[in-house]
Amino acid sequence: GGGAGLKCIIKVEYKIDRPYLHKELFIKLPHKPEGSDRYFVSCMWNHDRPETIFNIWLESYIPYKVPKCYFADICAETTNFIVITESIAWSPKGTKEFKPGDVEPAYDKYMDWELPDGGPMYYHACCKALGKIAAYHKAGKLHPQVNDMFPMPPECKEMPKGLPGMNAQQRKESTAKIDGLIKFVSETAKAVMPPEVADKEWLERWKTQALHFLDYQIEVQCFMHGCGTSNPSDYVVLTHNNLQIDNAYFWHDDDNELQVGLLDWGVLACGPLANAVQGCISGAEYKVQLENREDFLDTVLSSYALYGGADLDERRFKQMSDLQLMGWATGIIANVAQVIKHTHPKKEWPEIKDWMDERLVGRFQTRAHVSQFKIALQLWRELDLHHNFLEWLQQEGLPMKKA
């Protein structure tokens, strides 16, 4: 599953066996050297280094179950790496009844209809984990050299004023990407999109709003990093930044409480806590986010404060969540090309009339990106995010920028 590298499972025998040694091991490798996947994942995004460092040094410090690491190494010069861990004993797909301790099936991203409750209790468990790990970071309970491995960014104390918006070239490129997304959701994939998302008249208004938001990227990031607060670093933490459903495993304990274990640490870094939350709940279905987002945010804040982090301002954190949601929606405008790469716009999309078509739901890159287009636009419209953005600009004393 996923697209971060090559993966396999091997069965092993030991010359000298011990009860704690696993007979099935999971191996993670980089993409093949040719092609763009290796370049983007291993070089541009640098996902392999955090994964390797976590498994060597931080695995035993995290207050949650993670797969036991047997070996990990990386070569910075070639970007070759390998991580070998225990293989999780997943229940078979479709299993609905579990005994305490049984690991539930491996759930796929953007397929939350597979989750027994549709998602809320699973995202709740993940949000609790995000807050607790962040608190352990702040309380000094992680590795003694964690700040050398994953340094905190410089503090951003004040909101910068007078910054220019996008230059002409940036605006041209962003406009082209937005136009591409509008064409995709209103024409190419219109048959599988909700009517409100495929509405061209609304999409043109959204385009204006999205370009407006993109003019304030530096100011938004400063706000996310806690600028203007008495201690900005309280809002910046080390925690799992991509804790979606496919990067976790779940089981119930003897008291029937849902427990979570954590996988895939390729984007581990210090960053705004609100960004990590969005990286988790963005995989939830539209209605689940709409009905549970405040509870998810409260869960993170409560967990963070309970285990040693600061007591963060709830209103500000909600604003951060709104801004990060807008950032997500304007960030995915570049991903139409990934969908077209995996599902042909002329040969296949004209025949796709249903969300459960295997050419959509059965292809990871297509399903993941098209789901994000749909959910992000639904939330932008329903939550009236641009209105909230205008209020935030006024609150921060930020003037309109000339195009």
Image (cartoon, helix red, strand yellow):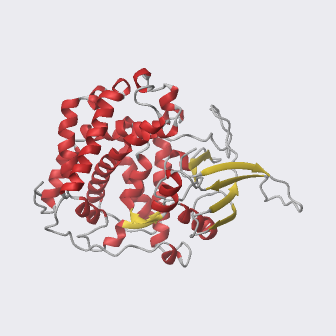
Q: Judge whether 50 appears above or below 343 on screen.
A: below
Residue at image coords 50%, 49%: 125
In which quadrant will I find the C terminus?
bottom left
Q: Is residue 95 left or right of residue 327?
A: right
Q: Position of residue 268 (x, y in %)?
A: 49, 62
Q: Residue, x 12% and y 63% (percent of image)?
A: 397
Q: Quarter holding the N terminus?
A: top right
- Residue 267's spot in the image, x, y percent? 48, 60
For the residue pair 213 and 345, the one nearer the viewer reads as 345
Query: Is 395 on the left-hand or right-hand side of 177?
Result: left
Nearest to the observer: residue 307 or residue 77: 77
Task: Indicate left or right for 345 with 4 as reference.
Answer: left
Q: Which image quadrant is residue 96 in?
A: top right
The image shows residue 368 at horizontal and vertical percentages of 45, 40
> Can I make out residue 291 in this image?
no
Quarter of image, res 292:
top left
> Measuring 37% from the left and 35% from the top, which residue is drawn there?
287
Q: Is residue 204 visible?
A: yes
Point out residue 79 in the picture as x, y percentages from the top left corner.
57, 64
Q: Is residue 110 left or right of residue 61?
A: left
Q: Nearer the viewer, residue 133 or 299?
A: 133
Residue lying at the far right in this picture: please name it: 15
Please tell me how many numbered marks the rendered image carries. 0
